[in-house]
Image (cartoon, grey):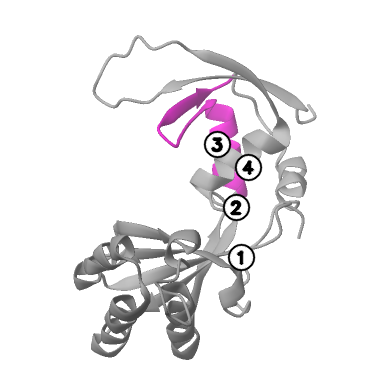
Amino acid sequence: MPLPETIPVRYTDEEAGYVTVRPIVKQTFQLSELLDMILSVAGKDVARVKQLLHSGTVVYHFFRYSWNGFDADEQELAAELARFPDAEPARPFAAEQCTVAILETGGVHPRLIVELPRAAASKRRLFRGQSFWDRLMEIASQDKPCYHHYSYGRRADLYRLDLDGENILEIIQAAQQFAPRNVRETMAALQGAASILFVCSRSANHSK
């Protein structure tokens, strides 16, 4: 059976541990839209995506999406997934493509502490020749963040910069000198951070 072009989908708020009476919303997804959402959860793993299509349910951004599960031909599914971007470990860090800096904890499963959008960090203080974002990108570029992975949820490549005493001090000094008050307060979270993830967007479309 060929892959369906459209899939009727139902979704509602996901509240683990609670019975909810919130209404179920119905919507028709294109196959590419459903795959885009599943990839954000499962990554580009044909077997895992096939399993989720068969199960007919996935939780994404605090909503549970459900559809009539179906068995996907593995070759057809692989061809569909090939339309989506792949991770590119050799792709160099490009500061001009960064849109968000994410402070995260250390450990096996790092926890997000705070997100700093470029728009907020690019606001210049009075009589300052550059913004905090400009200086942060300079620091990141000189330290050369490592490629982490491609995020389907963010549609962007992620690069990780491990923090140490030297670059933390540089970032704190940059925040004190260039950042507006709200950003300076946000960057206080550096004290509990082990690394920064830089979100670097690609083209808005899915094609490679």
Mark 4 or 2: the one toward you: 4
Estimate the spatial distance between the alpha carbons at disc 4 and disc 2, rounded to whole Å: 10 Å
Q: What residue would you read off at disc 4?
A: 36
Which residue type carries mark 1?
A: Ala
Which residue type carries mark 3?
A: Gln
SS class of the residue under badge 1? loop
Q: What residue would you read off at disc 3?
A: 51
Quadrant containing the C terminus is bottom right
56 lies above or below 182: above
Residue at the (49%, 78%) spot, across then down: 134
Which residue type carries mark 2?
A: Lys
Mark 3 or 1: the one toward you: 1
Q: Name the foreground residue: 122 vs 102.
A: 122
Q: Is residue 141 left or right of residue 87?
A: left
**Number of marks in picture:** 4
First to last magenta residue range: 46-67
Residue 53, x across and y down, in percent: 59, 32
Q: Residues within 10 Å of mark 1 (few under 14, many from 20)?
A: some
Q: What residue would you read off at disc 2?
A: 44
Q: Residue furthest left?
A: 191
